[in-house]
Amino acid sequence: MESDVRTLISPILLKRHKVLYFATLTFFVLLFAVVFFFPLYWMITGAVKDPQELIQPTPTLIPESFYPGTYLDAWRELKIGKFLLNTAMYAGGAWILQLLVDVPAAYALSKLRPWGGKLVLGAMLATLMLPMTALLIPAYLVVTNLGLLNTPWAIWLPAAANAFNIYVLKRFFDQIPKDLLDAAEIDGAGKIRMLWSVVLPLSRPVLAVVSILAIIGAWKDFLWPLLVLQEEGTRNISVALHYMAGTSGVTPFNQMLAGLVIASVPMIVVFVLFQRHILSGLSAGGMKG
Amino acid sequence: MVKLKNQLTAYGLMALGIVIFAVFSWYPLARGIVLSFQQWNFITDPEFVGLDNYELIFNDPLFWTAWWNTLKFTLIALALGYVVPFALAVIINEARHAKGFFRTAIYLPLMLPPIVVVILWKYFYDPGNGVLNAALRGVGLPESQWHQGSTTAILSLVIVSTWANMGGAFIMYLAALQNIPGELYEAAEIEGAGIWRRLWHVTIPNMRFIMLVLLLLQVVATMQVFIEPFELTGITNQDTITVMVLIYRYAFVVNQDFGMAAAMSVLLFIVLGVFSALYLRLTRDSE
């Protein structure tokens, strides 16, 4: 036991009541496991049960029938693969475009101090106050008028108007010492060169946070894609799953569960790989809902 | 000359950003407000109709139902979704083991696409063969109609939303708790303060800022609730229809009336704007 951390309860008390401490700890470990892992377990194992077993009144904890091939069936028959690919394209494009648009803008606002920069920054940050849902209807009209419905641009372009990115990036760039940039300038580097070879290499942590949030955000998005991706072939995985679940008579229950599992895998992999970034970015002031 | 060149470079770098913000944020905001005073169909030119759209929605009985449901949802979500992660963070902060496990477990649902979460819970809630009623039967408790019962519907939706979203608040509370200097607790204890008084006089005052910020964020987020009622109970269910669902309904389903939907959006925007402004004020002042 690390006894040097002092919290609400004193270390002495925790040591004295070791049994009580471990009993409580075990209780909470089990509670968290049941509440947060059981649903995932049920989804993963449910997919390998046959449809008969899935609809019987008492659900089985351990599958009595075993058809792992359901995952393949879902992949083929529900075209999960295609929708995953669509989603990856939307998320990837949104990510790249956000970096291409927001990084240079934040750099200019932070380091070049252009005339009217305060006004531009203020107008961008003011949109942080706008709930995305307030813009839903008019933004839909804009996308329709520009002829972007059912194209990836309907996802990519609005995603790039991300005030949160501008705010986080600018705040990070502000902390890069002026001396570093002055030194580069004396060496004859232009403003764009400085962004590329001084600012960006120093900004890896913030770029990582922005990138991860961009990809997760695009992957989870539902309402906006539901509106602008109407043709079946253009749907992302979330919208596709919504339509599959809506036709429950047609979509076999076990394949539906397999679809849910497959849709969850990519972000869980991202979580496993970047857990540290995601959780620390969140606690270090990445204040986003 | 050098100055001018710098200005040009700066605006060159910002150009894409300015254009995209203009087209997809600034213009739609103005367009949305104008639209709320217009009659809109996709065929003829939009026509100004004064306050007609607002009158139409005020006279729609669903308007009040949707606001009332949204208010109920928000209040229950606060009672549950605000208190539970805080209490859990305070308890788990006492743990000297398995902290990583707790953080991972509670954050995991946030990595799932929300549609997956909602569809999964729909299966759990199934009054016939769902896991939850089976569990209730198993321990001899009465079964529930969950999202299909008129009195339990909103609570059921809140449970889903809390399960899916509380990880973020939990992690932030935990980080804030770890920043409270241990000497404060020691000093309080020497002065004879018991656990509850230490919680009340040391923990909570030190967490006041983050608690307020998360309260505002949560109000803004829950008032825009959409996917839970949309997928679990559908857009025609009067027990759960919320403001966002009604906006969707006006624009894309029943009325196909963008003017009415825009008027509803403007009202929601005004209500949320107050909370958002407070939040921005708070977080900016703290720097």
Image (cartoon, coloured by chain):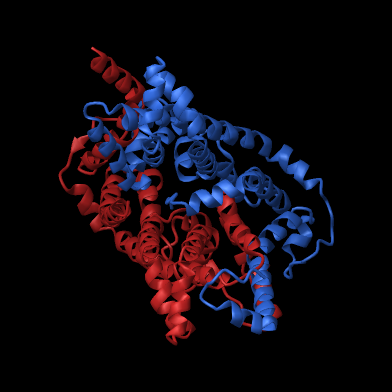
Residue at point 55%, 32% (across, down): A92
Q: Nearer the viewer, residue B1 or B99?
A: B1
Residue B130 is left or right of residue A280, and the answer is right
Quadrant in which the N terminus of chain A is drawn: bottom right
B48 vs A35: above or below: above
Which of the 4 image quadrants contains residue B192? bottom left
**Residue drawn where x is 48% and y is 29% of the image:** A200
Question: Quick one: A52 or B263, which is closer to the camera?
Answer: B263
Instruction: Give the mark count.
Output: 0
Tell me where residue B244 appears, x and y as whole percent. 38, 53
Residue A217 appears left or right of B9: right
Decide: is B100 above or below A212. below
Spot occupied by residue B41 in the image (x, y as percentages of width and height): 30, 36
Q: Residue furthest left?
A: B50
Task: Kindly identify the residue that appears in the image at 69 percent across and 52 percent down.
Answer: A257
Residue B224 visible at all = yes
The image shows residue A12 at horizontal and vertical percentages of 60, 80
Pick whichever, B95 or A216, lies toward us: B95
Asked whether the viewer can see residue A246, the reply is: no
Residue at x 39% of width, y 50% of height: B249
Q: Give the residue at the far bottom of this rendering.
A: B192
The residue at the far top in this view is B1
Where is A125 relative to A17, above or below?
Answer: above
Q: Is residue B41 left or right of residue B254?
A: left
Colour of chain A in the image: blue
**Residue A45 in picture, x, y percent from top left:** 76, 57
The red-coloured chain is labelled B
